Image: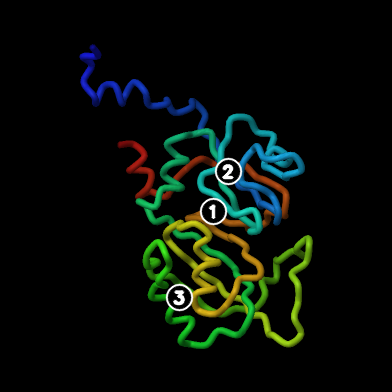
């Protein structure tokens, strides 16, 4: 019989923080899985990341592009990806159609999805980002329908949330680029490339990491 108190057992089983925490920003291309393994023929993180013992902090769909964070620190990984801390994530979204004010207000106040109503979001129409790279393969264009860009910021992470939100208001997503997670963004980071940055959290999250 194990007489060790539950709190002590949990403490012993917790993976220790690495002596050198590391944080990597990666600009994930379209068609790449946000994991290091897959089926034969799949493109995975293994094809682009050669830093050992780092793992994604959160996910990005295979058919989405942009910022993915990876770290070797399990506690840091959990704090970044946990919905508890509602870390803001900003996306640039190419949608089919032209959003009206009603659709924008609907996205902003919350959209009813099968797994619940989304939290309030920040959304605005915008021009195509000047820093944007060509997608491979390119987005299919339909001459009879106008495409529009949205800048959308959410603070949760339901499965394929942004795509389901825009679809719910009649604006199917054609292209999705995650530009920013909390204080980290894609500025100066070309597709398929990565950059290591100091493994530091915003002050309010850093306090929670010490607990």
Q: Position of residue 107 (x, y in %)?
A: 45, 75
Whichever of labels 1 and 2 marks the residue nearer the N terminus, that label is 1
Q: Name the residue under label 2.
A: 197
Is residue 161 depicted above or below 141 in this figure?
A: above
Whichever of labels 1 and 3 marks the residue nearer the N terminus, that label is 3
Q: Estimate the spatial distance between the alpha carbons at disc 3 and disc 2, rounded to whole Å.
A: 33 Å
Who's the residue at 37% across and 47% down the image?
A: 205
Q: Residues within 10 Å of mark 3 (few under 14, many from 20)?
A: many
Is 41 on the left-hand or right-hand side of 71? right
Q: Where is residue 166 in the image (x, y as percent from the top left)?
A: 53, 73
Disc assigned to residue 55:
none
Which mark's residue is nearer the viewer, 1 or 3? 3
Q: Which residue lies furthest to the top in this view?
A: 1
Q: Estimate the spatial distance between the alpha carbons at disc 1 and disc 3, rounded to whole Å.
A: 24 Å
Is residue 165 depicted above or below 148 in this figure?
A: above
Disc assigned to residue 184:
1
Q: Is mark 2 on a helix, strand or loop?
A: strand
Q: How many marks can you see?
A: 3
Q: Name the residue under label 3.
A: 107
Q: In front here: 90 or 101?
A: 101
Q: In which quarter of the image is residue 175?
A: bottom right
Q: Estimate the spatial distance between the alpha carbons at disc 1 and disc 2, rounded to whole Å.
A: 9 Å
Which mark's residue is nearer the viewer, 3 or 2? 3
């Amino acid at each position: 019989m194990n007489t060790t108190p539950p709190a002590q057992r949990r403490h012993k089983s917790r993976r220790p923080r690495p002596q050198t925490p590391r944080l990597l920003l990666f600009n994930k291309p379209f068609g790449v899985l946000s994991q290091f393994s897959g089926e034969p023929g799949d493109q995975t993180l293994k094809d682009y990341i050669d830093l050992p013992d780092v793992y994604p902090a959160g996910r990005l769909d295979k058919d989405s592009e942009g910022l993915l964070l990876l770290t070797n620190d399990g506690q840091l990984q959990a704090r970044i990806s946990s919905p508890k801390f509602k870390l803001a994530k900003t996306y640039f979204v190419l949608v089919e159609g032209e959003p009206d004010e009603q659709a924008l207000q609907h996205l902003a106040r919350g959209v009813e999805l099968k797994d619940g109503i989304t939290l309030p979001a920040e959304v605005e129409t915008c021009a195509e980002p000047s820093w944007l790279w060509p997608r491979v393969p390119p987005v299919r264009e339909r001459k009879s329908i106008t495409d529009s860009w949205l800048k959308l910021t959410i603070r949760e992470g339901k499965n394929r949330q942004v795509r389901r939100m825009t679809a719910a208001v009649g604006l199917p997503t054609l292209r999705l680029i995650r530009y920013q997670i909390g204080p980290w963004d894609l500025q100066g980071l070309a597709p398929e490339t990565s950059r290591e940055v100091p493994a530091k959290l915003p002050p309010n999250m850093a306090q929670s990491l010490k607990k």
